[in-house]
Amino acid sequence: MFTLSELADFLKEKGLIGTVLNYENDKEIKRFSSLAHPSKDALCWSKRLLPIDEVPECGVLLCLPEQEANPDRATVIIRTVEPRRAFGMVVDRFYPEESKTGISKDAVIDESAKIGLNVYIGPGCIIGSGCVIGDDTRLDANVTIYDNVKIGRRCHISGGAVIGADGHGYVLDENNRYKKIRHMGGVSIGDDVDIGANTCVDRGVLDDTIIGNNTKIDNLVQVAHNVQIGENCMITGGCQIGGSCVIGRDCWLAPSAVIRNGVSIANEVRVCMKSVVYQSVKQDRVTVYGDPAKVIMPYKIDEATKI
């Protein structure tokens, strides 16, 4: 795929390279490998310091600045303060994902929908009336987009996701029986948003449910009606966000976090795994944990990973 010299030049260009150990001769790197399955022609990476005996026998290892080399192995050690970021950028540069375009013959698209340029719509997708799909967006197989949903540019929605279905809104009628409230809003999704497999984003009752630019939503997440999620948030698997919640920018919701309906969360807030937020979090840059969730520490964001 690339040579060691090409890799070093790229990392230098991006300002991500530190010291290099065991670099004597140029060689070809043919694959990426995990630490569990290294090979002599592969690039591996580690976000933690490895004991010397755990340094893999691979072509090159991207690692932390404090990492020591194993003198019995010819692994080239490239030290960088941000090995995870460096790895991601190397993959994008030397092994970019192939872009998909085109509309499957098995997709069902309302004639009023507006489809942008270079869009991919996979088999079994359904797109309702009044929808807008932005340029370079990808809908994998069996995605359902209800009426009046707007999706920005360069988004990726994985298989089985449902965008724009009615929320869970009911009132008791005169006979004390639940009656559904009609949902007349839509869903508005910004640019560069990812939505994982089998995730549901409900339409608003009156106003749109909103997902900000560059927010990444994992698999099996429930986003209820009228929710507003800010830019650059990370919503991980199994999270449940109740109706009319407002999530600020740069927030991180760990797996299975629950946000009670009507709660607001400030900017740059981390909600820990399986925590339940019953009351609004008004302070920026904090970490909340527990059931009920309480502030336990500041949230110091790693600017490279937003973790």
Image: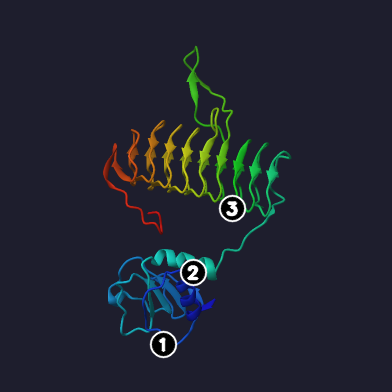
User: Residue 154 — which label?
Assistant: 3
For badge 1, the amino acid type reads Glu
What is the residue that sits farthest to the right in this orientation?
111
> Picture quarter containing residue 86?
bottom left
**Which residue type does callout 2 highlight?**
Val
Tell me where residue 261 appears, x and y as whole percent: 41, 31
Q: In the shown orientation, is residue 296 left or right of residue 98? A: left
**Mark 2 or 1, nearer chain start:** 1
Work out whether residue 301 can be spotted. Answer: yes
Q: How much space separates mark 2 and mark 1, taking CA atoms? A: 21 Å
**Callout 3 crowding tier (Cα within 10 Å): few <14, some 14–19, many ≥20:** some
Residue at the limit of the structure toward the left, as seen here? 296
Tell me which label, 2 or 3, sits earlier in the chain: 2
Q: Secondary structure at mark 1?
A: loop
Label 2, secondary structure: give it: helix
**Location of the N terminus (image quadrant):** bottom right
Residue 51 in picture, x, y percent from top left: 27, 73
Query: Given the image, on which type of amino acid does mark 3 rest?
Result: Arg
Above or below — where is 74 with respect to 304?
A: below
Dot 1 corresponds to which residue? Answer: 24
Q: Which residue lies most toward the top here? A: 174
Residue 292 lies, in percent from the top left, at 29, 36
- Disc 2 crowd rating (10 Å Cα; few below 14, some 14-19, many 20+) is some
Is residue 262 depicted above or below 286 in this figure? above
Examine the rendered structure and indicate whether residue 135 appears above or below residue 242. below
Foreground of the two, 145 or 88: 88
Q: Which mark is residue 227?
A: none
Q: Secondary structure at mark 3?
A: loop
For image coordinates 38% across by 38% down, the residue present is 265
Label 1: few (<14), some (14–19) or many (≥20) C-alpha neighbours in 10 Å: few
Which quadrant, please, contains the C terminus? bottom left
Q: Which residue is mark 2?
A: 90
